[in-house]
Amino acid sequence: MDQGAAGRKADDPASTGRTSAGQRLGADYWKLLLSSGMTNLADGIGLVAWPWLASLITRDPLAIALVGVAQRLPWFILSLPAGVIIDRLDRRQIVIAMDALRCLMLAVLTLAIALPGTMPPVPLAGFPVLALYGLLLFSALVTGSAEVLRDSSAGTLLPAIVPRDRLETANARMFGLEVLTNMMIGPSLAGFLLALALPLVFGLTGVAFALAGLLVFSIRGPFRATRRVTQGIDANPHADGGRGQPTVGATGFIGEAKEGLAYLFARPLLRDLALGLGCFNALENMLLIALVLYAQEVLHLGSAGYGLLLTGGAVGGLAAALVGERFIRLFGQAACLRLAVAILLLQAVVPLVLPFPEPIWLTLALFSAMGTVWNIITVSLRQRLIPAHLLGRVTSVYRLFGLGMIPLGFVLSGLTVTVTEPLVGRHAALCAPFALAAVLVALLLATLWRRLSPAAIAAFVSTAAGDEPEAAR
């Protein structure tokens, strides 16, 4: 992959005559890392704040789930066009603009919550409360749309800043800070702030997005991808040394989007990882949204207790970020990917058989640990092996499936409770999403087991390096 294809040729070891081994990650990386920490702190606060605000407005599980749908639906709608935009425009400027948009939207929501009479004494009491719920859905949709462009752009900045052989280290630290802020500090802080003042929660979230944008603004230099159009997806992406000389091929917005889509589907492992991640994330979020009312009505937790429950994910994810590289070297990439799916099955089963905060906290920790390991493996593979001029588009196609399917999990969770409650009662209905998810995760594990084999990973690496076509499976 050409390190200079995103506008940073000076960072390419081949162009400077230096080996990248032992190179420092550099000041720009640390700015990007801190910016990621701020956005993930905001997202971590939102893990508690968004569904909790919805639960204050309504106790309808489907209405609460729709807030999560609004946040994640943009990944399905915007991922493909976002990839083309990212490969056409300056990626740094996209990140800054999207952080500014999210800050503005959160400021509007904060002011609306602070207005007298908007928060109900009882769920859905009067027009002001209905209007607040509508604004909550709109805010979730806008911030979710900005997240698509922001996160996809930020992911393409990293390989332009960091030497290729430091990507695992850079990603591990990135995921470590993400876990610390998103899953430990953020949810705990949200529970504390919710007890103090509801508007304060969303106000500080907006401030975090503003600080993140300022950090990326301080990174200098252009980050516009070198426009190189390939002659079909089977052309060797490294044949020209990765320097980005133009060749004949697809042009136009739709043609470029199709090129990213075709690249992914021509490589079975990349396709299976994207589709598998979509099912994986849909089922995970099915469980997480079900946990909101489950924590309140079955575990009898308040906002602070719910925030502390989610810190289990932080502990596991942080531990994996620290030792993930060694864990992957010890057990291999294929075994780690398979284990991540197996742990999700445990997360679905435990609330059914052990309805107590402590074992649920532990399963969240185990799942987050393996989820972080999954990310270290798959993100590093994509960043290292996908040509830089295609990275934005292929990543967006990957996320179209990987994140775009999350709303299905939210809707399925809410519908499961709504449909089963008249038949089995409220308590059993709140447990129903976990039972259904356990069955679906078992099916997913059986489907992916052979597809996530060492041979499949080796074939993808070989094809991406331009050695030989990947064998059909």
Image: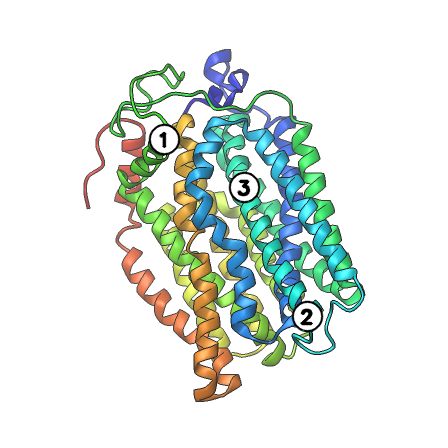
Q: Earlier in the sequence, mark 2 or mark 1?
A: 2
Quadrant of the image occupied by residue 466: top left
Residue drawn at point x = 60 percent, y = 49 percent: 143
Residue drawn at point x = 66 percent, y = 50 percent: 42
Report the mark closest to the observer, 2 or 1.
2
Report the mark closest to the observer, 3 or 2.
2
Q: Kindly state the secondary structure of the residue where label 2 is placed.
A: helix
Would you say the residues marked 2 and 1 are in contact, meaning their CB atoms lie under 8 Å apart? no
Q: CA distance from mark 2 to mark 1?
A: 46 Å
Q: Tell me the amino acid under the disc marked 2.
A: Phe
**Residue matched to label 3:** 151
Residue drawn at point x = 31 percent, y = 35 percent: 263
Q: CA distance from mark 3 to mark 2?
A: 35 Å
Quadrant that contains the N terminus: top left
User: Residue 205's spot in the image, x, y percent?
Assistant: 70, 51
As displayed, is residue 208 above or below residue 437?
Answer: above
Would you say the residues marked 3 and 2 are in contact, meaning their CB atoms lie under 8 Å apart? no
Q: Is residue 436 left or right of residue 162?
A: left
User: Residue 284's spot in the image, x, y percent?
Assistant: 46, 62
Callout 3 environment at 10 Å: few (<14), some (14 to 19), or many (20+)? some
As displayed, is residue 384 above or below residue 76?
Answer: above
Q: Nearer the viewer, residue 178 or 333?
A: 178
How many marks on residues? 3
Q: Kindly state the secondary structure of the residue where label 3 is placed.
A: helix
Q: Tell me the amino acid under the disc marked 3.
A: Asp
Q: Earlier in the sequence, mark 3 or mark 2?
A: 2
Callout 2 environment at 10 Å: few (<14), some (14 to 19), or many (20+)? few
